[in-house]
Amino acid sequence: MKLIGIISLIVLSLWLMYSVLSTVVIRTLSLKVIRNLGEAEGVLLTFDDGPHPEYTLELLKLLKEYNVRAVFFIVGELAEKYPGIIKQMHAEGHMLGIHHYQHKSNWSLLPHQTKEQITRTKGILEQIIGEEIVLYRPPWGHFNLTTLLSTKSLQTLMWSHIYKDWKVEDHYLEKLLKEPAEAGSILLLHDNGDTKGAEDTAPLEMMDYLRRYLIKMQEENLPFAEPQILLKRKES
């Protein structure tokens, strides 16, 4: 029994180094990770976990109404189901990024599985829009020891502001209106409530707050960053 306990402790320690510790180091040191646009004149909107056949289409209408472009981090298996939504995103000037083929944490993936989740989604998106995909964001912001190697040809875009909008009526989204993000900030929101830990109607509440936020930004003449600024950063 003592030997089993020692082996279990070793396995747990190795897993913590592979997953949690790697995430802490990468995010703390911002290793190949963008968390703020810095000199950019505007706020960048980003959305994770879609596309959703209902909510994403409503979101696209809202963004079009206020002439705002965003970055969408796409789940590959959903892109396969709804390629028309992906094409619409691209046609309306939004940028697409990789958010794994399935919404799985890097903490639960072996190195070859991490690479497969990324490359498979990249191939699907590029086939749909006919352009290279250069952006990546890991589900839940989780990295593992090999994630940077699997994404060496990509830009990893994280966030500076998060609002826990996957839950309904937790009032976190009030910060979106009460504490306006400064220029160069990267905001994280979600257009799909079907993922683990989320509530299925949460995107409806998100879009209600987002509309009010867009109105406020418009009234105060505050700009949004264009996603294409990320391509300039990659080239430099």
Image (tube, rainbow, N blue to C red):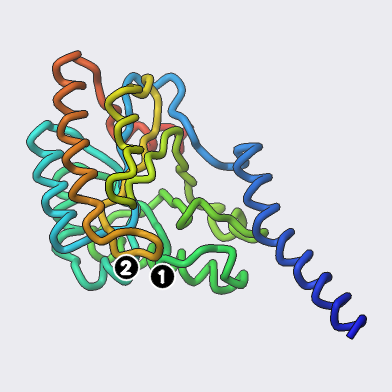
- Cβ atoms under marks 2 and 1 closer than 8 Å: yes
Find residue 216 and report its horizontal and vertical position in percent: 18, 21
Residue at the image position 45 percent from the left and 51 percent from the top: 137
In the picture, the quarter occupied by the N terminus is bottom right
Occupied quadrant, residue 161: top left
Image location of residue 114, percent across then percent down? 54, 67
- Up/down of 119 relative to 157, above or below: below
Mark 1 = which residue? 120
Label 1 sits on a secondary structure element that is: helix
Residue drawn at the location 58% of the way across and 73% of the way down? 112
> Tag 2: residue type?
Ile
Q: Position of residue 183 (x, y in %)?
A: 36, 20
Q: Which residue is mark 2?
A: 124
Residue beneath the point at 58% across and 55% down: 143
Is 17 on the left or on the right of 1, as rendered? left
> Residue 208: image x %, image y %?
16, 40
